[in-house]
Image (spheres, helix red, strand yellow):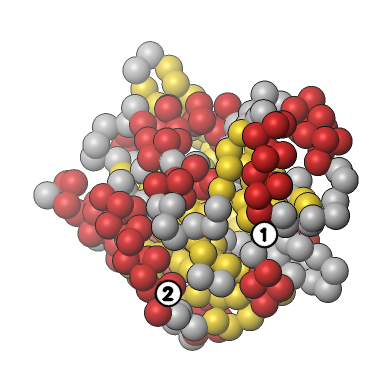
Amino acid sequence: MGLKVAFQMDPVGGVDIDADSSFRLAEEAQARGHELFFYTPDRLIYREGRVLARGWPLTLRRVKGDHATLGEEREIDLADWDVVWLRQDPPFDMAYITSTHLLEMLPSRTLVVNDPFWVRNYPEKLLVLNFPDLTPPTLIARDLAAIRAFKAEHGDVILKPLYGNGGAGVFRLDPNDRNLSSLHELFTGLSREPLIVQKYLPAVTKGDKRVILVDGEAAGAINRVPAEGETRSNMHVGGRAEKAELTVRDREICAAIGPLLREKGQVFVGIDVIGENLTEINLTSPTGLQELERFDGTNVAARIWEAVERRHAARRG
């Protein structure tokens, strides 16, 4: 039986239909006979005990430039819907956090994916701190002296904003670099948040692997290779995607973190692995789904929906 599915995401008209994971999830939902509704995060509303959204019925097709048809705008009560997908892109700011609080108020019969309580409490660069044996040496601090000491110990480090995304604000500081003080001044002038510093992993030149987990189980991986002269492997800053196989170490990492992800309702997760090290666990709006499907010739979106449908049936049962 078809489900009523609402997508809270960035404007659907602007997505790249060959790369966007939210589009692929919605496309697969439509193929499975589910009803689609779309709204942007700024149209989420709390009113007198009800969580509402203003948006549009949605129909999709895989035609560039004509991939989405919106129905008549209307207001819905999300408690009447079976599934709500929390899929807007970061930044992970107070607007994002507020939306997780509002979605958390929905009754248990409405399944929110990924579970908003744990999306809020497990930001990608903080959740990995629960697994220090899997990660490179890491420091979270705002204090310049602490950052200097960490850099002196490890020599070559990566410095980035704790709540950054998409490779923005990522700097490599090698042993000869003289910019730490200036960067610290810049970042601390922009926000009150700590910074994250990690030991530089030379293996990144061979790629930053994105492993996709579905309900805590590894579904496959792609490798993202930085452009020449670039430290960051993010695809929108010039990194390219390549086919990748899951290694023994990848599977060890997934086995270690998978049970926690499954327990906390994190159905669709993307982790970043450089060499032997886990660097991030992405819960907010994971990407890489379409690239993985193309390289592996598999329907991972269907596997994700099977997990969602099982969870929904268990709640309604």
Q: Residue at x 68, y 69 (%)?
A: 202
Q: Provide residue 193's location: percent of width, then percent of height.
A: 64, 29
Is mark 1 in CB contact (under 8 Å) with mark 2?
no
**Residue 66 horizontal side relative to residue 45, left or right:** right
**Residue 47 horizontal side relative to residue 259, left or right:** right
Q: Nearer the viewer, mark 1 or mark 2?
A: 1
**Residue 119 horizontal side relative to residue 215, left or right:** right
Residue type of the residue flagged with mark 1: Tyr
**Residue 13 horizontal side relative to residue 227, left or right:** left
Q: Provide residue 278's location: percent of width, then percent of height.
A: 50, 61
Numbered circle sitting on residue 249: 2
Q: Residues within 10 Å of mark 2 (few under 14, many from 20)?
A: some
In front of the other: 289 or 217: 217
In front of the other: 208 or 299: 208
Classify mark 1: helix, strand or loop. loop
- Sequence order check: which comes first, mark 1 or mark 2? 1
Mark 1 vs mark 2, CA separation in Å: 19 Å
Q: Residues within 10 Å of mark 1 (few under 14, many from 20)?
A: some
Residue 181 visible in the current orientation: yes
| Quarter residue 233 falls in | bottom right
Q: Residue at x 18, y 46 (%)?
A: 315
Q: Residue at x 27, y 57 (%)?
A: 259
Residue 17 against residue 139 in the figure, above or below: below
Numbered circle sitting on residue 200: 1
Classify mark 2: helix, strand or loop. helix
Residue 290 visible in the current orientation: no
Q: Provide residue 166's location: percent of width, then percent of height.
A: 68, 52
